[in-house]
Amino acid sequence: MSEKPRVGIFGMTSCYGCQLEIINLEENILRLLDHVNISYWRLALETPSDPKNLDIAIIEGSASNQEEIEELREIRQNSKIVITIGACAALGGVQGMRNLMNNERVMSAAYSNLSGVRATEVKAIHEVIKVDYAVRGCPINKEEFAAAILHLLAGTQPPAWNMPVCNECKIKGNECFFERKKPLPHYQSRVCLGPISEAGCGARCPSNGMPCDGCRGWTEDAHVKQWIKEGLERNQTIEDLAMLVHRYSGGTKDSEIAKE
Amino acid sequence: MNETIDLKHIARVEGYGRLIVDIDNKQLKDAKFNVLEGARFFEGILLGKKYNEVPIIISRICAICSASHSIVSTYAVENALSIRPSEQTHLLRKLLVYGEMIESHLLHTYYLALPDYIRQPSVIPLASSHPDVVKRAFYGHGLGNEIQRKIGGRAVHPIRNVVGGFSMFPSLEEMESIRKKIPLMIEETLETIKLFRDLPDQPTIESKRDYAAIWDCNEYAYCYAKEIAHGYGDPFPATEYQTHLIEEVRPYSHTKFSSLNGESFMVGALPRLNLNHHLLTNVGKEALELSKLNLPDFDTYHNNIAQLVETVDCAQRSIDILDKFISDDFEFETFDFNPKPGNGIAVTEAPRGLLVHQYTFDEDLRCTYCDVVTPTAYNQHKMETDCVDLIPRIAHRPREDIELFLNMLIRAYDPCISCSAHSVKLDVKFV
């Protein structure tokens, strides 16, 4: 009988929320362990066996310094399949906003002395190494993660949604933020990213009374320029719209659009 | 004999931390705790952002304390902009924090700390050796998450807690369904308190007696208070945190050191229990009695069992709030407000201790200043000074025991290293 596939779980710069969502699977983790061997996971295991010869590497977080870039290259060499979990890994995450801001001003606000700060430009993982699949979201949805792993074990391709959050929002019967007659309350942003963001979350934020803020990234054929036009018509500044559209995606090449 | 113990990447903690201990002739020569987590510069990212974006972005500092970050940031923003949330909003926020305390404390005690106490590398082997304990872990931890999901909209990074109140409310059925599940969790956590209490051959220390926590003379404060209490006399107003809790740079390290009256101090469940035990619920008092903790207690390792006592207390408090909501008319509030520019400070307790947020907003209600100090940033200095007491007690033991007990010491703080790296002002100055 062949051995169970070896899985390693790695954390780069992030809040560890996506790894926490894996733990939040509770007893379903044990079911997953019937099928895989977790051979490396700092968050949960002492004395990890060596992170080599992996069938699947699971990576959370963005690359934000040279050590992480080197570690990522090693992980790629040691793994047959690399998947990322979460917005930091897929898009750069909220820390990626510093790529779009005055970087020195951002860093000096957090650090009184910048001479030894080991920080490079924030990068999504696929900007550093080849990534085979990304489980999206900030944080990921644990069921979607488990389903993706089961697909990989079965040798099938995990799903891509290729449709905007609006589709799921309509199915849920939520009132559209763009079509609302009453003025929006102050705690909400003036615009919703649903029309240009990748679905798969079940319109999580709109279903909880908040507009979509695009944590899953842009969907295929997203009409970003049209969305920006809509925003400008709602009295938003171009700077605010650029920051909102890249709240999670400052670590990708897409962010060039914001710099325009 | 000179010996250096270097725990390069401490496992089973959130984040990337390293402890280096130099031992000379069975005495501690030097101990350094390093934060190696990638920096995220939150204080800078928030510059120029509108006030209503702040809680959404800042909760991403940390997953396991995301409810605390979300809540303390909404309070700090509200204080800055002169917004007064409703009484029901305070209660919902408390309920959300109780859910987080339950979830985080049980994650730490069962999954991260317990394996050390029964000398296993992780919780996974416990599934076969201690199936009943692992079952309790799943149930209690899952229930803490369920409370956060039903109240906050999501277990990690709550959506519904916003500046001024809540964007959506749980249904009566949802509240009743959580309410029904809590008593079993209390019963099972009491069992786990006995388990931790009776574990043989465990390390102990008598650490320095300095500690701090938020303070409200009327209740055990887990969620937002106006004062900070400590071991040196009267509590001080939360707004004076920068005067009392001094952050200092030391040339040999690249992290800042926090001190209170010139000494390291501890924040977290044990300090809170030391300060507030007379304010526990009756069920909480029962848990405390069962734990056999003799308060005030200054053994850092007892932070684990203190977390379990708090879990029981928070579970009872959740029942009390849910019962009130279920029997009184729970209101699906709509609200709006008139924000005014200004500066605001708020302090709360994350599961692992004192958490401070401060913001300033300009005329356009954009953030011009942000300061976040996290519990692990406060605890780092104490992690080092604890080694002074610990090392002479354990230096005669085999090296693997010394390493284990040091790992257990760091883990007992339930450190959130990602949190501390993302917000403490690391002064990275290499000599």
Image: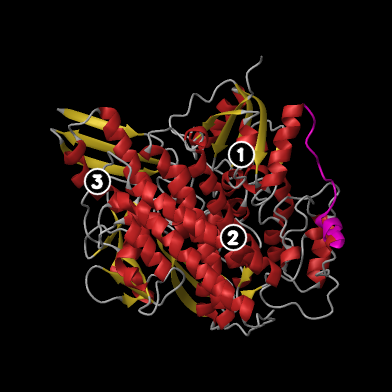
Circle 2: element type? helix
Q: Nearer the viewer, mark 2 or mark 3?
A: 2
Residue extending farthest to the top is A1
Is residue B313 within the magenta segment? no
Pointer 3 local density, CA inside 10 Å: few below 14, some 14–19, many at least 20: some
- Amino acid tagged 3: Thr
Q: Is residue B122 above or below residue A178?
A: above
Q: Nearer the viewer, mark 1 or mark 2?
A: 2
Q: Do labels 1 and 2 touch, CB within 8 Å?
A: no
- Amino acid tagged 2: Lys
* Residue drawn at x 53%, y 62% as measured from the top left: B183
> What range is drawn magenta here?
A155-171
Circle 3: element type? loop
Residue B336 or residue A116, whichever sits in front: B336
- Amino acid tagged 1: Ile
Residue B181 is tagged as: 2
Percent position of residue B421, x then y: 44, 50
Percent position of residue B335, x then y: 67, 82
The residue indicated by pointer 3 is B204
Residue A29 is tagged as: 1
The answer to whether residue B159 of the structure is visible from this angle is no
Q: Do marks 1 and 2 share a chain?
A: no
Pointer 1 local density, CA inside 10 Å: few below 14, some 14–19, many at least 20: some
